[in-house]
Image: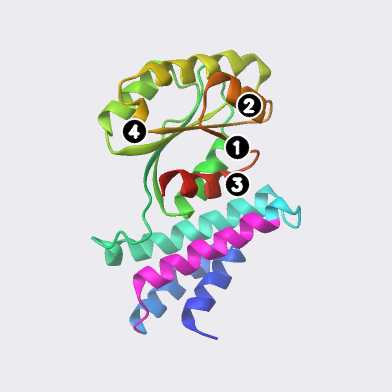
Amino acid sequence: MSQIQTVADAVAAGKTKLVGGLVQEALDGGCDAGELLNAMIDAMGLVGERFKKNEIFVPEMLIAAKAMKKGVEVLKPHLAGDNTTMYGKMIIGTVSGDLHDIGKNLVAMMIESAGFEVIDLGVDVSVSKFMEAIEANPDVKIVGLSALLTTTMPSLKETVAALNEAPFRSNIKVMVGGAPITQEFADEIGADAYTPDAASAAQKAKELAA
């Protein structure tokens, strides 16, 4: 089995402690950093598919994403200037009044694993904080908003409304998600995309940034 495949399998299996060493070995063995990154991204794609089919659950997905992160840390210095798989920046946060972060963190990790630079604003993020982050990162492509409570759905609506009126709106795509959110609600408030889980969020983000 090739070293690249070994790395991909270790990521998919969530072997956090081994991935960094395996990536280094593959690099030392002459493997291309871009190919290694793509293999890890593909491995996370498979993890996402297994999650969608309920073959694995959130803990396994988090562990795989952590393993991916370890691998990317080793790869980063070798990827400088090589943006073949980097899709650009995404800002993500849980809306004002909502302190839930497990779902958002999972989405952030999956999207990062798919080749994005993720700027995570955390939880209880006000409209102005989202605005400031976008203005500070004019090259951002996607803004992801999470609401996990029915009581914070109005806050999500308000944030999307503010983004829709902002002068930079044509440069960004707005993604929404969270337990109470539906496609209908996303359409009603004027978001560009809704995804039901972290795996589909990563897939959708790639489509939106392409």
| CA neighbours of label 1 inside 10 A, class few (<14), some (14 to 19), many (20+) | some
Q: Which residue is mark 2?
A: 148
Check disc 4 and report its element: helix, strand or loop: helix
Q: CA distance from mark 3 to mark 4?
A: 22 Å
As drawn, 102 above or below 83? above
Q: Mark 2 near mark 1, Cβ–Cβ under 8 Å? A: yes
| Residue wearing tag 1 | 103
Q: Position of residue 93 (x, y in %)?
A: 47, 30
Q: Earlier in the sequence, mark 3 or mark 4?
A: 4
Under tag 3, what secondary structure?
helix
Mark 1 lies on a secondary structure that is helix
Q: Is residue 84 above or below residue 152?
A: below
The residue indicated by pointer 3 is: 200
Question: Picture coordinates of residue 11 (x, y %)?
Answer: 55, 65
Secondary structure mostly seen in magenta is helix
Q: In the image, is 81 to the left or to the right of 153?
A: left
Q: Position of residue 37 (x, y in %)?
A: 42, 65
> Which residue: 47% across, 77% down?
4
The numbered mark, 4 or 2, whose residue comes first in the sequence reads 2
Mark 3 nearby-residue class (10 Å; few <14, some 14–19, many ≥20): many
**Label 2 secondary element:** loop
| Magenta region, residue range | 30-50
Mark 4 or 1: the one toward you: 4
Residue under the image location 53 percent in, 64 percent down: 42
Mark pair 3, 2: CA separation: 17 Å
> Mark 2 to mark 1: distance in Å?
8 Å
Query: Does the CB distance between marks 3 and 4 fall below 8 Å?
Result: no
Sequence-wise, which precedes: disc 3 or disc 2?
2
Inspect the image, locate mark 3, and give the three-letter code of the amino acid beneath it.
Ser
